[in-house]
Amino acid sequence: MKRTLNRISLFKENQSVNCPIDNTILEATLAMNINHTHACGGQGKCSTCRVSVMQGIDNCSPRNAVEQEMAETLNFPTEIRLACQTKLKGNVSIRRMVSDKLDMDIISEQFSSDSKIALGSQQKLTIVFTDIVNYTAFAEKFPPYDIVHVLNRYYRIMNVIIQNHNGIISDVAGDGILAVFGTDKTSDNSVLDAINAIAEMKEKLNTFNDYLESNFSTTFGIRAGVHYGNVIVGPFDTGAMKKMAVIGDNVNYASRIETANKEFGTELLLSEDAYNVVKEIYPKNNEFKTSLKGKTGTYKLYELKQ
Ligand code: FES
């Protein structure tokens, strides 16, 4: 009886191999002497055989129970599959993801990570940039110890508020916070979560300002820019530092919106994409049309009346 063969195109190797219908991807690649890492011997326990399915994901068998458990443990995006568990019903194009010891080290650390963020995925999120009004004058006036101490107090307080509204601080730089909302899918309106978080941050700043007033004779304010759009999100690990980071043009866009507050004398500006999500809740607003540094075209920004 003639056996059905599907074709696997291997991106890195720039070659194709046949895959009989009852074989896994791993069995097919090993049969052709591809150096396909498979530390647990194909038991579905190590994930080192993982491949990224670049084309033909619908031609892959559904995840079996073993692979499903691994995918949930490591929060795999749809296109990441275990080659030792995946069979084919059509042609696919794949890229092996583990090439050397460094790849193996990164993978073994993923097993101990408590990150609930998918390992590199595109998601539609709400991106928030904030900065502190009066920070520059404060930083010029006081020594480094005070600056670091005050910023740490500020970050600690704001982090709790952001988390309480289903957000994550992705990065801090000086007085700026980059936070994203919507990664854990617990809320159906991440823009509203972000707006509520900013409102509470401003409220908490009143108490914080009592501390600043009595210790440094100064007070802070908060400016924020909010955008809603696709970003690439993933846990990044330099070896010395781990963080959940978001990258992409929409992150830069949110940063530019935050900066535009200075031009318009506002404290909270939303992009049109973000505003469209909440315009029924916040029908009253100021609307601005402006260009943004580093971006072409004209953009509508909205100041919310909270
Ligand atoms: S070889 Fe270990 S999970 Fe596939």
Image: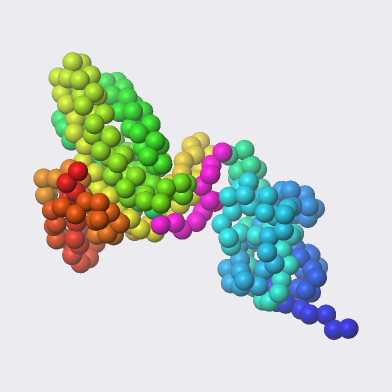
Question: Is residue 118 covered in magenta?
Answer: yes
Q: Which residues are magenta?
A: 114-124
132 left or right of 94? left
Q: Position of residue 79 (x, y in %)?
A: 58, 62
Indicate whether 279 appears above or below 172: below
Q: Residue furthest front?
A: 280
Name which residue lies at 27% across and 34% down.
201
Q: Residue at x 72, y 63 (%)?
A: 86
Q: Can you see residue 253? A: no
Picture coordinates of residue 123, whole percent (x, y) = 44, 56
Q: Quadrant of the N terminus?
A: bottom right
Above or below residue 245? Residue 241 is above
Q: Main secondary structure of the magenta part?
A: loop
Q: Residue at x 58, y 68 (%)?
A: 54
**Residue in the picture at 71% in, 74% down:** 89
- On the question of residue 116 being in view, the answer is yes
